[in-house]
Amino acid sequence: MNNVTELLTISYPIIQGGMGNISNAQLTAAVSNAGGLGTIGCGTMPPEQVENIILDTKRLTNKPFALNIALQVSPFVDELITLSIQHDIPVISLSAGNPAPYIPKLHEHGKVVIAIVASVKHAQKAEAAGADILVAEGFEAAGINSALELTTFTLVPQVVQKVTIPVIAAGGIGDGKGLAAALMLGAEGVQIGTRFIATKEAPFHENYKAQLLQANGTDAIIIGRSFNRLRRVIGTSYVRSLLEKEKNGIGLQEFACLTSEAHHVIGALDGDLDRGFINGGQVAGLIEDIPSVKALIETMMEEAKDQLKSGLKQLESVSKIE
């Protein structure tokens, strides 16, 4: 066990990223049942819809899972905090906003609080506010992104150096080599999203999974630069039309409408890639199969061990030469 697995009472230091309005009980429970930490992302969903997913998840697993609340995205933050207390959800992750006002109440009710950060400054503030764990998310990640554009490989060691609480790495991680690299950077676990989309239990449209299988790293592109509202998505026909609209001076209100969670659902769940978008990180270039969640997590753990041993051998070899 390490600090992350001990705090979260999980077997493996692998957690699922929140997936907003396409979150579901099946994938959340599968990750938790496989020894990781499944996560329900709330997006803009009303509390009643989130509650149904919570109840379904509890029917599918007796293991811990988390609730992710995107503070500047959800219009129901207070209600979701209350919901987490009512349903005794042990872990709450707070993203896209300042977690400080919510941490004391969550701690009052025994919650482990994860804060998702994109800079050292944000990390230090979150630690000072009482966060238990930080997720340092690099610019490679899918979905809503920080305008600071720090990559995982540079962000994680900076955050680890400046805080005392455990750090989890996110962004561009989807296999055992990525897990090993994160550990070597000083993280104590990883958060992954895109890789979990391409699994057997994930109830997303086959068109979504097919796009990930055929994608390379450069197919995961950023939209919203014109408005400083960055989102990393897979470059489908709908996304290409959005980029053209941005180029031609689309207004913020129209852009916000076209990139709403409703259009995310159209792409990810309905599979209509002409009318909706699909989130995807740069890790898409590493996805070549659709395993079960259990197989993915166990393979990641074994591959990470092998990679760490291989790296150590290489260092020992260099040392002998010298």
Image (cartoon, rainbow, N blue to C red):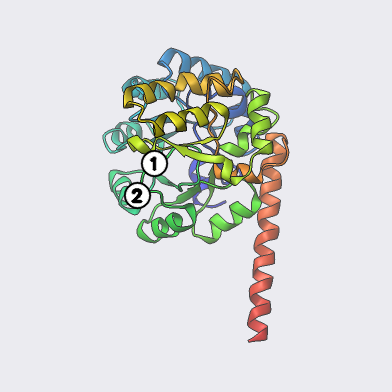
Tell me the residue at 39%/56% (across/down). 159
- Which of 76 and 163 lies nearest the eye of the viewer? 76
- Which of 143 and 112 lies nearest the eye of the viewer? 143
Q: Are marks 2 and 1 in contact (CB under 8 Å)?
A: yes
- Residue 83, image x and y in percent? 40, 20
The label on residue 123 is 2
- Residue 200, image x and y in percent? 70, 29
Q: Residues within 10 Å of mark 2 (few under 14, many from 20)?
A: many
Tell me the kind of residue under disc 1.
Ala
Q: Which quarter of the rendered picture does the C terminus lie within? A: bottom right
Q: Which structural element holds mark 1?
A: strand
- Which of 241 and 11 lies nearest the eye of the viewer? 241
- Residue 207, image x and y in percent? 66, 25
The label on residue 115 is 1
Is residue 72 shown left or right of residue 184?
left
- Which of 2 and 210 lies nearest the eye of the viewer? 210
Separation of disc 2 and disc 1 at Cα? Answer: 8 Å
Is residue 269 shown left or right of residue 313?
left
Q: Quadrant of residue 133?
A: top left
Q: Which structural element holds mark 2?
A: helix
